[in-house]
Image (tube, rainbow, N blue to C red):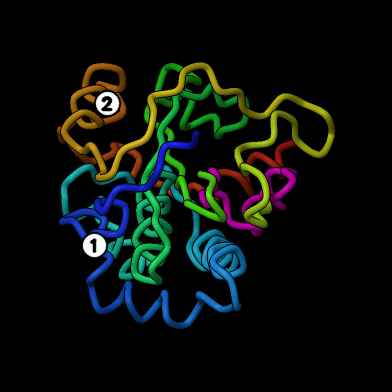
Amino acid sequence: MPDLPSPATLASTALIDSDAPSVHAFATQHAQGSTDRERAAALYLAVRDSFRYDPYRIDLSPAGMRASSVLAHGHGWCVPKAALLTAACRAAGIPARMGFADVRNHLSTARMRETMKTDLFIWHGYTDIWIDGQWRKATPAFNIGLCDKFGLLPLEFDGHADSIYHPFDKTGQRHMEYVHQRGTFDDLPLDDIVRDFQAVYGGWLEGNATRSSLQGASFDRDIDNEKEAH
């Protein structure tokens, strides 16, 4: 029997702020369709492609991590973008929660690899959405424009099956693999994420306990420069 949704999967929180006016307006605009499946799929595409994925601009403060911050800034990395999809689903009356896993990323920029000193990304975030009596995983991190730059197949989500990172890119090279599942959470576990990021990525957060040291650089420009070099 599936893990049934609790009332918390429809509730607004300080970080999954589904009651924020901007989140409510976003959900109203994009949750189009006659069924929860259709509306969730429409919200997924809106979150995936309306906001650039940018792992350089990580801000682990509460203000930087809440769902509505993605709407305000126009970009986000995997966790805030998943928080936004979770919040938008809740605002549309669809139960949703956050899921996390550790993944090994085989495609990133040289600057990012040098700074992180590892290709292991801990606390990779996705959204778990309750559709037709089942929890379905949806990963809205990589916008379609970035996928084209990286040569990745964009992830689709139709509500019938889980949508997580493809293991290979368009050329058959390994892209990302899941190495550890951390489970699902009704709220964003920010304290745990901050603690583990500080332990694993000390150099990445150097100079500030919660902000990426790469914030002054451009993720998109680094990708373009590396493509030109090759």
Category of crowding for the residue at label 2, using alpha-carbon neighbours closer than 10 angstroms: few (below 14), some (14–19), many (at least 20): some
Q: Which residue is mark 2?
A: 197
Is residue 143 found left or right of 29 in the rendered image?
right
Magenta stretch, residue numbers: 136-155
Q: Tag count in the figure? A: 2
Q: Which residue is mark 1?
A: 17
List x then y, in percent, for residue 89.
42, 63
Q: Residue at x 46, y 43 (%)?
A: 126
Residue 153 magenta-highlighted: yes
Question: SS at mark 2?
Answer: helix
Q: Residue at x 31, y 38 (%)?
A: 185
List x then y, in percent, for residue 105.
56, 26
Is residue 203 found left or right of 168 in the rendered image?
left
List x then y, in percent, for residue 35.
58, 71
Is residue 223 found left or right of 128 in the rendered image?
right
Asked whether 135 or 27 is in front, the reply is 135
Question: SS at mark 1?
Answer: loop
